[in-house]
Image: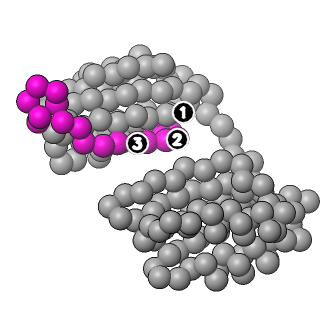
Amino acid sequence: MQSSLVLTVLGPDRAGLVNSIAEAVKAHHGNWQESRMVHLAGQFAGLAHVTLPQEHLVDLKQVLQTLQTGGLQILVIHSDAAVPRTITPLTLELLGHDRPGIIHDITRELAALNVNIEELESEQRAAPMSSELMFYAHLKLGLPEGVTADDVQGAFEAMPDPLTVDLSFS
């Protein structure tokens, strides 16, 4: 029987970090299903979904434990339970003037619609003409039954002026 795990990795970034985890997974007959990894402010943050035969699970966990040196943390979560998927996927991009609280305001609107945020990437970008800092976000959402892309767009358009954003649905 196969075990399904989600690995959360956080700590100081260094060359070879991902390779050491991949070697441990491979050595225990595991398969790397998908991952999201990023370097932020000198730190490494990563998520990986791996599967492996259940009889190798304990040994993999022990090896991952030995990799936790120099501030590196690896959290192993079992994900064997089936997770219900949302009915309608929606991708959108937001662009607006950056300010404190913008992520809070965006996520509050989505939570009010019971929309699931499946992926969120954000950054500050310089405006082309003024070099003023702009907020940019790329989101992949899961819309529950009864919520449409128009509902999401309407929620963002109804926000106060300081949070006016341009939406691009795909």
Residue 62: x and y, percent? 72, 81
- State the CA–CA distance, disc 2 to disc 1: 7 Å
Quickly name the residue at label 1: 142
Residue 39: x and y, percent? 42, 57
Q: Quadrant of residue 146?
A: top right
Query: What SS does tag 1 mark?
Result: strand
How many residues crowd around disc 3 within 10 Å: few (fewer than 14), some, or many (20 or more)?
few
Badge nearest the viewer, 3 or 2: 3
Which of these two is toward me, 68 or 139? 68
Query: Which amino acid type corresponds to the residue marked 2 in the rendered image?
Result: Glu
Q: Is residue 127 magenta?
A: yes
Q: Are marks 2 and 1 in contact (CB under 8 Å)?
A: yes
Q: Quadrant of residue 28?
A: bottom right
- State the CA–CA distance, disc 1 to disc 3: 15 Å
Magenta part of the protein: which range? 114-132
Which of these two is toward me, 107 or 72? 72
